[in-house]
Image: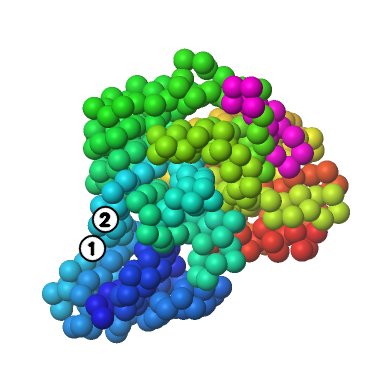
Amino acid sequence: MTKIAFCGAAGNGISPLEQIMIKKGYEVYGSDRSFDEGKDESRKQALQAVGLKIMPQDGSGITKDVSCVYASAALDNANPDIKKANELGIPVKSRSDLLCEIFSEYKKGIAVGGTAGKTTTTAMIAYILDVLGQKPTMINGGMLCNYENMPGLPNYLYNDGEYCVIEADESDGSIRKYKPYIGLVNNISHDHTSIEKLVEYFSTFANNISGALVVNYDCPLARNLKSEAKIFSYSIGDNNADLTATNVCAVDNGIEYQIENKKFKLNLIGKFNVSNALAAISACMIAGIDKFEAAKALENFRGIKVRLEKIGTSKGVTVYNDFAHNPSKIEASLLALKDYPGRIIAMYQPHTPYSAVNTGDEVAAAVAKVLAPEDVMIMQEIYELTPQDVGISSANIIKQIQNNGHKNALFLPFKSDTRKFVLENVKSGDRIVIMGAHDNSLADFSRELLEAI
């Protein structure tokens, strides 16, 4: 049995690969700093239950019989496991290298890219193919609510069908590695790097596609991508696209839309989720699925954990947890909540100093544009802030929000500050949304807030 190791084993991107390699018969070891610190215990237990052997992230688990170490993109050669692997001459590869290897094994690969919505769209495509009997493999960065009772973490499917559906990440440029049969681009907006680099990444991706490129007609940068493959477009309301949804309307606990003369409902809120659904239906149409069957299948799709996930309601107050961490995602989530009555209390925690500096101006503008005067915007201090990051703070973005006209904006550095403010000020009818990436404890914090209320 071949022995391999994963460094950063708790990560959303690495954990589905670990589980698939276990299914393939490998002896799989994993380390993570959060496990060493006693964090992410439920995730640790779920991975151990399906066969992952947890080791400390101190290099001790990297022995001569390990054939390869796969590492998170966030780690470098100073990491003890990577350092030990280098000393022993063991190959060190990235998460995306292994994803590319697995993806290339399938006859018809579907790769989903975009700076917003790719996790949900990936899940929607896989869900449609699965419930309609196509037996897809799926490798995703989010946990599917429909499969939450499966052993391990529900961010993958492993089957023997011809389709493999993956979330293709642009943040590190690895989207350029994949050569899909069907490629999809939801949108291109400012996120991890410059727009110019993003366009370059997605253009390379488009040229790697052999079958069809699916693009969001409502996003000019996506619509203008060129490819030797067939191009198929979707839109909300624009009949120039190949697939169009009309009469989009928020309803209780969801959103309705029409394709041609047929009405469908998603059990998710937000116009952006209709766009995600159209993307998924488009990809499935190219795969030979009837569009109405695909749309009907999505009526039972329950979404992704921490993607505007409704945690629950207590005393008339509803709490949501959301992975939103760039301007377009934050704006889309807030707009989705504004479709319904009641004050919004939003808390956003930037995940890195770079993110805060790179997109802070746009976050401030989006928040000030969407929120009403009575709505409250709270920002915690940056999650990965270090003492070396002088002059960088969430407080700077709060000041920009206030300068943009939304005065009801507060800098509350710690979760305890937010909890105190909420409990002292919340009232029936309010919606609370906790937003941010990388910090897995935000989901627990959302639940703790609901319980405290």
The location of residue 149, given as percent across then percent down, is 59, 66
Above or below — where is 245 with respect to 75? above
Residue neighbourhood size for the residue with mark 2, other residues' Cα within 10 Å, grouped as few (<14), some (14–19), many (≥20): few
Above or below — where is 242 with respect to 204? above
**Residue at mark 2:** 105
Magenta-tinted stretch: 248-262
Which quadrant would the N terminus be assigned to in this image?
bottom left
Q: Please report the residue visible at 41 percent of the width from the left and 77 percent of the height from the top.
A: 52
Say whether residue 252 is magenta.
Answer: yes
Magenta region, main secondary structure: strand
Amino acid on which the number 2 mark rests in the picture: Glu
**Residue at mark 1:** 93
Q: Please report the residue visible at 67 percent of the width from the left and 58 percent of the height from the top.
A: 446
Q: Say whether residue 339 is left or right of residue 37.
A: right
Say whether residue 197 is magenta.
Answer: no
Which quadrant would the C terminus be assigned to in this image?
bottom right
Q: Secondary structure at mark 2?
A: loop
* Residue 215 at least partly seen: yes
